[in-house]
Amino acid sequence: MTKRLDIVFLGLSLSSSWGNGHATTFRGLLKGLHELGHRVTFLERDVPWYANHRDLRDPDFCTLRYYETV
């Protein structure tokens, strides 16, 4: 690869796979991008439903940031 990309995802939840099938798909995709040398940031809305069931608080393959409103 000649150019590393900075990629930002805005998604439902990366930190909690509880009741969220998207989390496992996002995790696999982001891990793959990281392994290719890209820098990835995932923006997740901080809502109690997922906050109370987080199983991935500090991923080593991307930067995870929480937001309250857009």
Image: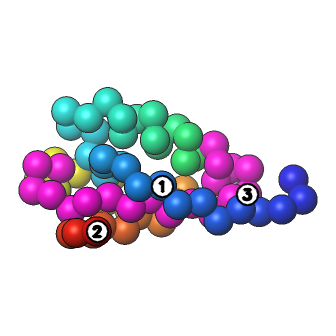
Give the quarter of the image for residue 39: bottom right
- Residue stretch rendered in magenta on the structure: 32-50
The quadrant the C terminus occupies is bottom left
In magenta stretch: residue 46: yes
Q: Which residue is mark 2?
A: 70
Mark 1–mark 2 CB contact (< 8 Å): no
Q: Is residue 60 visible?
A: no
Instruction: Tell me the crowding category of disc 2: few under 14, some 14 to 19, or many 20 or more residues within 10 angstroms, Cα based.
Output: few
- Horizontal side, residue 40 vs residue 19: left or right: right
Badge number at residue 36: none
Task: Give the spatial CA distance, label 1 vs label 3.
Answer: 16 Å
* Residue in view at x 37 percent, y 68 percent: 65
Q: Which residue is mark 3?
A: 37
Instruction: Tell me the crowding category of disc 3: few under 14, some 14 to 19, or many 20 or more residues within 10 angstroms, Cα based.
Output: some
Q: Which residue is mark 1?
A: 9
Q: Is residue 61 visible?
A: yes
Question: Which of the two residues, 11 or 24, is positioned nearer the viewer here?
Answer: 11
- Horizontal side, residue 60 vs residue 47: left or right: right
